[in-house]
Every structure is written in structure tokens, then in C-alpha cells.
Image: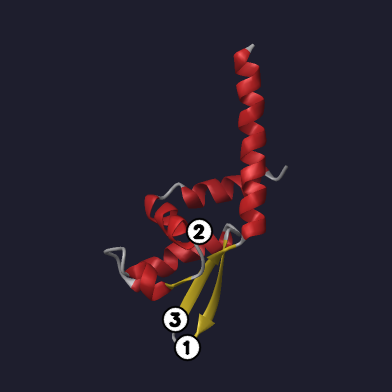
Amino acid sequence: MDYLRLSKIMKAIADPNRLQILDMISTGEKCACDILDDFEFTQPTLSHHMKVLIEAGIVTARKEGKWHYYSLVIENVDQFQKVINQIFKTNLKEGAM
């Protein structure tokens, strides 16, 4: 298990704005312009948040014209969910004894 990678993802999603962004793109690819409509911060701030999510490996970006389009990296999100479930299921079983 790669605990460093796991902690990087957890740190990335711990921010409420990034968590909201993930929720938004969980339904499919979104343009930065559409994401910005739901927040009261600037495009450079959005870029920072997206950089953190991309470096954590749970979001990918593609550029079209002047805008970036963001989507989840489903394989990495699925792997993250499996590891978290494994950790908490183990702990729940041990706590129930």
C-alpha cells in the first residue's frame, strides 16, 4: 500500500473547495469556466486547486482553446475508495470485538 500517495489524495480532498469541485466533476467533464461560476474566487485560485487535485492523481485536464476541461481519473478514484474501505472495514471489525 502506498501510504504517501494515499495521504496526498487525502490532503487534496480535505479542502472544502476542492471537495466541491470533485463533486461537480463527478458527473462528467467540466470546463473551468463552468466551475468558476459556482465559486467566488479567481481563475488563478481555481488553477491552484486544480493543480493540487491533478498532482494527487485524481483529476486530469485537457485544454481546448483558452479553457481547460477537468475530469476525474476514475481508476485512481476507484483505487482510493478500495484502500479507504479496506482500512475502515478492518478497523470496524477490530473495534466490534
* Label 2 CA crowd tier, 10 Å (few <14, some 14–19, many 20+): some
Instruction: Name which of mark 2 and mark 1 comes first in the sequence.
Output: 2
Judge from the rendering whether residue 43 lies leftward or rightward of residue 6; answer left or right: left
Residue at 45 percent of width and 46 percent of height: 14
Judge from the rendering whether residue 77 lies leftward or rightward of residue 68; answer left or right: right
Q: Amino acid at mark 2?
A: Ser
Q: Amino acid at mark 1?
A: Gly
Report helix, strand or loop for mark 2.
Answer: loop
From this view, report whether residue 49 is shown above or below residue 65.
above
Query: On residue 67, which mark appears?
Result: 3
Depth check, mark 2 against mark 1: the one in front is 2
Pointers 3 and 1 in contact (C-beta within 8 Å): yes
Q: CA distance from mark 3 to mark 1?
A: 6 Å
| Tag 2 residue | 26
Residue at 61 percent of width and 39 percent of height: 84
Pointers 3 and 2 in contact (C-beta within 8 Å): no
Q: CA distance from mark 2 to mark 1?
A: 23 Å
Instruction: Name which of mark 3 and mark 2 comes first in the sequence.
Output: 2
Residue at 64 percent of width and 11 percent of height: 97
From this view, report whether residue 95 is shown above or below residue 74.
above
